[in-house]
Image (tube, helix red, strand yellow):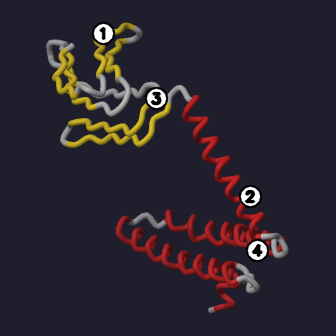
Amino acid sequence: MKKFIEIIFGKPYTESKWMLFAYWFGIVFYFIAIIVFIIQSVIYGNWAAILFPVIAFPILFRIVYNLNAFIVKRMKGINTRLLLIIGILLGLLMVGVITVAMLFGENVVMNANKKITNGNLHLSIGSLKGHYEVEAFETSDDGIVSIPYEATIGDGDVSLAIKRSDDMVWEKTVSPSDTVRSNSLV
């Protein structure tokens, strides 16, 4: 069995306990994932979906594991304090890039959750900067558009608007102190 695993995943780097742990953890994860994919394929009948992970995971595992083993071999004599400082600086750089992108981005939506239950649209947005379009409305036989909504704002103001082509048909601004429920007819 060990030879079979070494043929599929390559030989483990035995000089580091962490690398050896990562090797066996990856192999156990692979076999558990394959069992889950097989169960899923039996239930839903899509056997082609199992081929990609069965083939791709060992290839990607070999590439990533060998790259990590190479890095561990090269960093044998490097001071751990230097590695910690480099890791902290890279983490701060990533946080800075994300922060700058969000501050200067024109349209940023975070935690948008949109679902339809019994024909009713439920939209929840955690954080919004810019605009978010929703195309859900009912039109009666008379041509009247009914858009029921409920809006609760935590911080800032939100403008609810209905536009047809470039014409503004209806608009309402909701502020944090308002909790608005309406069955707006336009």
Three-letter code for the amino acid on which mark 1 is drawn: Val
Q: Nearer the viewer, residue 167 or 15?
A: 15
Marks 1 and 2 sit apart, C-alpha to C-alpha, by 55 Å
- Quarter containing the N terminus: bottom right
In the displayed structure image, the side of residue 114 where residue 93 appears, left or right? right
Label at residue 27: none
Please tell me which residue is depicted at 74% across the width and 58% down the height of the picture.
86
Image-quadrant location for residue 13: bottom right
x, y percentage for residue 178? 23, 25
Q: Nearer the viewer, mark 2 or mark 4?
A: 2
Q: Nearer the viewer, residue 65 or 178?
A: 178
**Residue denoted by label 4:** 69
- Quarter containing the C terminus: top left
Image-quadrant location for residue 118: top left
Three-letter code for the amino acid on which mark 3 is drawn: Lys
Give the total of numbered labels.
4
Label at residue 169: 1
Look at the picture and state if 53 lies above or below 101.
below
Label at residue 129: 3
- Tag 3: Cα neighbours inside 10 Å, few (<14), some, or many (≥20)? some
In the displayed structure image, the side of residue 105 where residue 89 appears, left or right? right
Label at residue 86: 2
